[in-house]
Image (cartoon, helix red, strand yellow):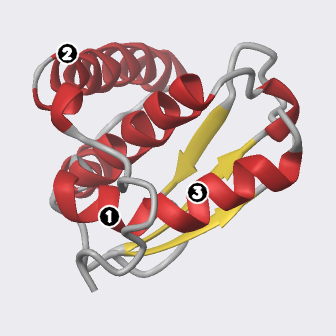
Amino acid sequence: MDASEVKLYVDRNVEHMMRQVGVPHWAVEVTYEPEANPNWMASCNRDGRDYEHATINIDPAKVQTIKGLHEAIVHELFHIALASLDVYRDVMRRKLKSEAEDEQEHILWTHTLETAVMRLEQGIGKSVTALPEGDEDAES
């Protein structure tokens, strides 16, 4: 898809989608840069900033359909919704004593978090909608 189409869809829908996912109070910046991981269309960074601030990056070159873009945004918003788990992780990681323990924790964390996000996508994620055409101010 053209980068301008991607940006237009995001600008029109992300706040509406944030309300539906339960994170309307978060400050979410959306960037449009290439993703280093060839398997990722989008990513979310909640590190290194104040709590309730996040950056979602979308790689426009990897967006093929509006449906795929929509699903990627929902996925990243669920990561934001689960961000309180990051606080727990940050405390627990300080207790690790070796690189091997850190690697094991990373594998476990990634699997657990991605599984939680996928379960949310398969359930309530199906009800997260885009704004109907012409309803830009429907929830303002």
Counting residues from the N terminus, which is met first, the one under dot 2 or under dot 3? 3
Residues at discs 3 and 1 in contact (Cβ within 8 Å) = no
Q: Quadrant of residue 110?
A: top left
CA neighbours of label 2 inside 10 A, class few (<14), some (14 to 19), many (20+): few
Q: Nearer the viewer, residue 10 or 102?
A: 10
CA neighbours of label 1 inside 10 A, class few (<14), some (14 to 19), many (20+): many
x then y, percent, for residue 21: 20, 52
Residue 33 appears anywhere in the view: no
Q: Nearer the viewer, residue 5 or 122?
A: 5
- Viewed as shown, does residue 38 lie left or right of 9? right
Gap between marks 2 and 1 measured at Cα: 19 Å
Residue that lies at the very extreme toward the left in this rendered image: 123
Q: Secondary structure at mark 1?
A: helix
Gap between marks 2 and 3 measured at Cα: 21 Å
The residue wearing badge 1 is 16
Q: Amino acid at mark 3?
A: Val
Q: Secondary structure at mark 2?
A: helix
Residue that lies at the very extreme toward the bottom in this rendered image: 140
- Viewed as shown, does residue 28 lie left or right of 114? right
- Going 22% across and 46% down the picture, which residue do you hit? 82
Residue 122 - label: 2
Q: Classify the position of the N terminus by image quarter.
A: top right
Q: Amino acid at mark 2?
A: Gln
The residue wearing badge 3 is 10
